[in-house]
Amino acid sequence: MKPVRYQTLAGQSGGYWILLAVLAALVAIGYAAAHYMEVHGHYVTGMSNQIVWGTPHVFAVFLIVAASGALNTASISSVFGKGDYKPLARLSALLSVALLVGGLIVLVLDLGRPERLIVAMTYYNFKSIFAWNIFLYVGFLLVVAIYLWMMFEPRMNKFGKTAGTIAFIWRFVLTTGTGSIFGFLVARQAYDAAIMAPLFIIMSLSFGTAIFLLVLVAAFEWTGRPLDDDILRRLKNLLAIFVSAVLYMTLAYHLTNLYATEHHGVERFILLEGGVYTTVFWLLQVILGSIVPLIICFSPTLSRSRGALVAASILVVIGGLAQVYVIIVGAQAFPLVLFPGMEESSTFFDGAVNDYAPSAPEILLGIGGIALALLIAVVAMRVLPFLPERLGEQPSATSEPVTAEAATS
């Protein structure tokens, strides 16, 4: 295999600086939204005493889960010895760090009192999965940073497989911990399920691969670097497998719940009578986020088009956000079952479906987290050589034309 040459982004074009300015502006708007919520209180959001995890948590969990999956390409290279993926390992590790930082920032700023994170970092309740996750998140950042050092420093390349294996194991443990947050919650009918952990692992692979594909295509197309269609074909096949697995695990989750009588109420709510949650589940998560991308990936014609592949990846991202929204918000909207087999009602909303509508500050904070992750990746690619000079000899005939900005960057 020919040695891979890496190169930083030139970063001298007007398009590059416009991209930086847009991302920085979105980050600033996101911070301003968080500051607004902190000053005025969470009553300015759609959240309440009944729904305490809102849209910011949806973005945060999505980014954290996707961060684990974004490392998949690097893991395939180092752990499983697939040399074709080795040139992309640096970008894969960079995206995993950037996405995790973006998700954690949203999570911290949505706490209402982010300065009290110090308490959570100094006093631990190891009966709480949240305490475990502090170690998992910080440890993941440290492990991937060391993994990147092994890849950048030629003298340390011989330890790359060991570092990659540790990162591979750690990311599965991290995603298991994130899924277990919901799997261990017995109060909500939609949670309290052991399948939550493997479901989140599969979700991470799907979301992370889709985001990696989008960043990869954008980075190579906008900078005019040759990108081999064979690499895209392999990643497309991986994406199709992961999307299929998420769809299967989701089916298994709901069929398991339907088997238990105690879960019939929440299943009827999510699948049939949940209003916006039912619509989001079937339209965005199942049809647009799963079935349509699978049709694109398995179509002999559409699967050869980079534009169609980008569209499929975007739909997977949208479907992923929808899935996390249904899991987090939809489960809280369904009333707590305080007395099984009986109906209850009071001035405390017992037995009532909880109302929730995302507010502008919540949405802007979530978008700010995504922008921060992309900003970290773009600046890092300008400072350090994360991208190979080429992946293939020339752009494919089916690829979209390179823009004028790409030719000058």
Image (spheres, rainbow, N blue to C red):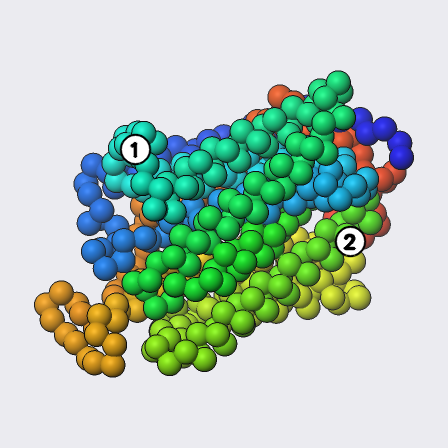
Q: Is residue 113 above or below residue 385?
A: below
Identify the element where label 2 is drawn.
helix
Identify the element where label 1 is drawn.
loop
Tell me what residue is drawn at x 57 percent, y 47 percent. Answer: 172
Tell me what residue is drawn at x 75 percent, y 60 percent. Answer: 303
Q: Is residue 197 above or below residue 213?
A: below
Quarter assignment of residue 333? bottom left
Residue 26 visible? The answer is no
Q: Please, what is the three-letter code of the amino acid marked with disc 1?
A: Tyr
Could you tell whether 303 is left or right of 20 in the image? right
Residue 209 location in percent, x, y?
63, 50
Please state which of the two labelled residues, at mark 2 or mark 1, is closer to the viewer: 1
Of the two numbered discs 2 and 1 on the same chain, state the one appearing first in sequence.
1
Camera-side residue of 316 and 353: 353
**Label 1, on which residue?**
123
Could you tell whether 393 is left or right of 370 in the image? right
Q: Residues within 10 Å of mark 1 (few under 14, many from 20)?
A: few
Tell me what residue is drawn at x 72 percent, y 44 percent. Answer: 76
Residue 61 location in percent, x, y?
44, 49
Picture disc at residue 233 = 2
Camera-side residue of 149 and 37: 149
Q: Please, what is the three-letter code of the amino acid marked with disc 2?
A: Arg
Quadrant in which the C terminus appears: top right
Q: Is residue 279 above or below residue 115?
A: below
Quarter assignment of residue 342? bottom left
